[in-house]
Image: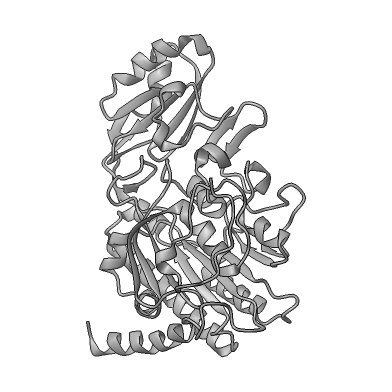
Amino acid sequence: MSLLDRALILLLGAVFLALGSPAVAAPPSGKRPIVILISLDGVSARLVKQAKTPALDAMAAAGARVERVLPPFPSNTFPSHATIATGVYPDKHGIINNKFFDRKRGNFDRERPASWLRVEPLWVTAEKQGVRAGIIMWVTSEGDWRGTLPSHHMKFRNHTADDQKVERILAWLSLPEEERPGLIMAWFRGTDTEGHRFGPASEEAVLQLERQDELLGRLGEGIARAGLSKQVTLVVVSDHGVVPLDQLVNLDRRLRSVGLGARVSTTGGVSNIYLEAPWERERARKALSEIPEISVYEREDLPREWRASAEGRLGDLIAVAQPGAAFSEDPRFVVGRAGDERRGGHGYPPGVPGTDGILFAAGPGIMKGARLAAAQGVDVNPTICAILGVRPAPRLDGHPLGALLEPGWAVVPGDAS
């Protein structure tokens, strides 16, 4: 590490230390806490070790870090962001992949409306208890959820750059206290695109993470300039990592080659197959099981520990690719080489090395120097509830990460059964 890098980490460390723990383990008197949750899409714990990330390093020094955050099944953007937002697994929140078919509602293809969620998201929990929320492009956050909207919202636009999101966050923080959000959740592009196109350990992915880290540093400096250092807790997570990709598999072509029709909803390492003739499940399963790069499950036989059996949304069959393979709609083959255009993938079962994400946190309520080897994505929601002092939604699957919190920090009791 160069002297310049060390100096930058020390400078940012001072900024994030200003976001550090108050003298007592409770929000400063008269100042309600503010939590900013940033998601960096596709950033793995491995990639952080490769890149120069002075802002994340400074957050870890001033606050806490979880080495590995385990995403749900499948480790794809939509189910993982829904899990972080709701504190429950896909079998409860219902977002079982980036694409799927709901037998009552119809096709889900990276849909944005919050109404697709079957349980209450964090911004609704906050709003119901008097904490204004500001949401920036978070997955499944558009529109109301059973009548409740966030106070502030920035809708998804493909052309919106992440530096514009930093500007929007700082603009919200400059609002009068009665209008200012106490919870801000923002999706950043992270390194997902670079991981897919060039590979998870590529120079392009490393450089993109370093650019994202610069934005985090700018955000920390802006919080300090706004005089909110003793009020804001910054939490940075990722939804999943990316692993190297070698092969692509087209299930639709295989089924049609044996005279079977189906709706194949696929993203990454998981496909849901909705058969035109459900009584032909055994024939379809036999045809697909001849592809060595995948495992095929009937809906009733999907491993219970994966927590993905959302009623009315799972396919008749579920195909899961082995790590290094992913599903494709390329009509040229059943199984083919991934090629130069696609070198990274995700969407695999829990525990596949490289698919885990990250968590860094600094600010009031966070213990300086706290470290955890691993946590679950479902634990983010109740941890933020604890910092905000709001009661979690009932029947969460996650639990507050007490090892990261200041001793005695007020954890609002809730039904987490």
Which image quarter holds the N terminus?
bottom left
Q: Where does residue 189 sit, x and y in percent of width and height?
A: 48, 61
Q: Where does residue 108 sit, x and y in percent of width and height?
A: 59, 37
Q: Is residue 53 left or right of residue 381?
A: left
Task: Decide if residue 376 is in sight here.
Answer: yes
Q: Nearer the viewer, residue 310 or 346?
A: 310
Q: Is residue 358 above or below residue 332?
A: below
- Counting every numbered tag in the picture gives 0
Picture residue at 50% right of the left edge, 62% below the top: 383
Picture residue at 60% right of the left edge, 59% below the top: 137
Q: Nearer the viewer, residue 8 or 92?
A: 92
Q: Nearer the viewer, residue 46 or 378?
A: 378
Q: Where does residue 324 sit, x and y in percent of width and height?
A: 27, 41
Picture residue at 43% right of the left edge, 11% below the top: 259
Q: Is residue 323 left or right of residue 159?
A: left
Q: Is residue 319 above or below residue 61?
A: above
Q: Where does residue 289 sit, x and y in percent of width and height?
A: 31, 20
Task: Decide if residue 186 is in sight here.
Answer: no
The image quarter in which residue 276 lies: top right
Q: Nearer the viewer, residue 4 or 349?
A: 349
